[in-house]
Amino acid sequence: MFSEDFQKLETTDKNKFAEVCNILLLKGFIVRDIFDPREKVIRINPDFRFMERHFDLFDAYLRFSGWNVNKDLILGVFSLTNEFEDNRIRIDRETSLILFTLRLIYEDEKQEGGTSGGSQGIYLTTPTLIKMMLDHGITMPGKKITGRLVCRGLRFLANHNIISKVSGSYDEGNVSFYILPSIIYAIDNDKIVAMSNALDQINNAENDANQGNLLKETNESKDDTEVSSDNVGGDEQ
């Protein structure tokens, strides 16, 4: 039973349990490998190790309120899902597109073997992310993609343990960061396929519209030339 096992913990571990449980509920993810800004190195997250040691306690406690704790020891991720699917965070379009792009980058790097086994994340900078968005034809309707706009989304993702900031300033629109393996659970493969298809449809529609406008402009230019010739001929008479 949870209550009996919990009472066996030392007082410090009971306090740590409450702390880690709240972090997981707040952020949705706890990852093993994190960037230490003071030491400027990737290190093992002590919260992850604590949760790993007491996983059965966390699992039993959170199940009381409909939460499921998912454990991925290969990627080094604990993630949280709710049986009732009511406790979901809705994010704006810009952050969704940033998250989508980061997932694409993560998949590309993983296929190329650039993730060091997948657990330590992928290093990226804001300018590189913007370039990747443009290369994939990802735009933000009605808005120009700027460093500050992107960093607003990155700040949100960092607060939920999907990326880990290394350096820079969100307010200045230029940060470097690691894409964490938790991104695999933040946006699943079905959503990736759906967003890819939607993006293809948008880009195809834009290309068709551009081609139609180009054809229209060409025809108008041709008509203008013919009218101009008639006028010249009329003047000569």
Image: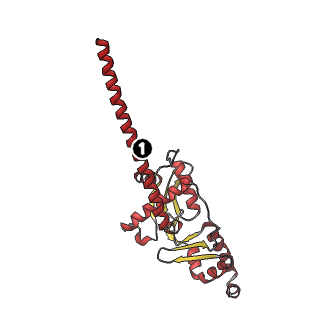
**Going by the picture, which residue comes out furthest to the top?**
237
Which of 107 and 227 lies nearest the eye of the viewer? Answer: 227
Picture layout, residue 202 above or below residue 217: below
Amino acid under disc 1 = Ala
* 159 on left or right of 118: right
At 35% from the left and 30% from the top, the residue drawn is: 221
Q: Position of residue 104 (x, y in %)?
A: 44, 61
Q: Where is residue 137 in the image (x, y as percent from the top left)?
A: 42, 51
The local secondary structure at tag 1 comes to: helix
Picture layout, residue 109 above or below residue 147: below
Asked if residue 59 can be seen in this view, the reply is: yes
Residue corresponding to mark 1: 209
Asked if residue 180 can be seen in this view, the reply is: no
Count of all numbered marks drawn on residues in the image: 1
Image quarter of residue 78: bottom right
Quadrant of the drawing holding the N terminus = bottom right
Picture layout, residue 1 above or below residue 13: below
Q: Position of residue 81 (x, y in %)?
A: 59, 72
Quadrant of the drawing holding the C terminus = top left
Which of 124 and 86 lies nearest the eye of the viewer? Answer: 86
At 68% from the left and 75% from the top, the residue drawn is: 18
At 61% from the left and 60% from the top, the residue drawn is: 90
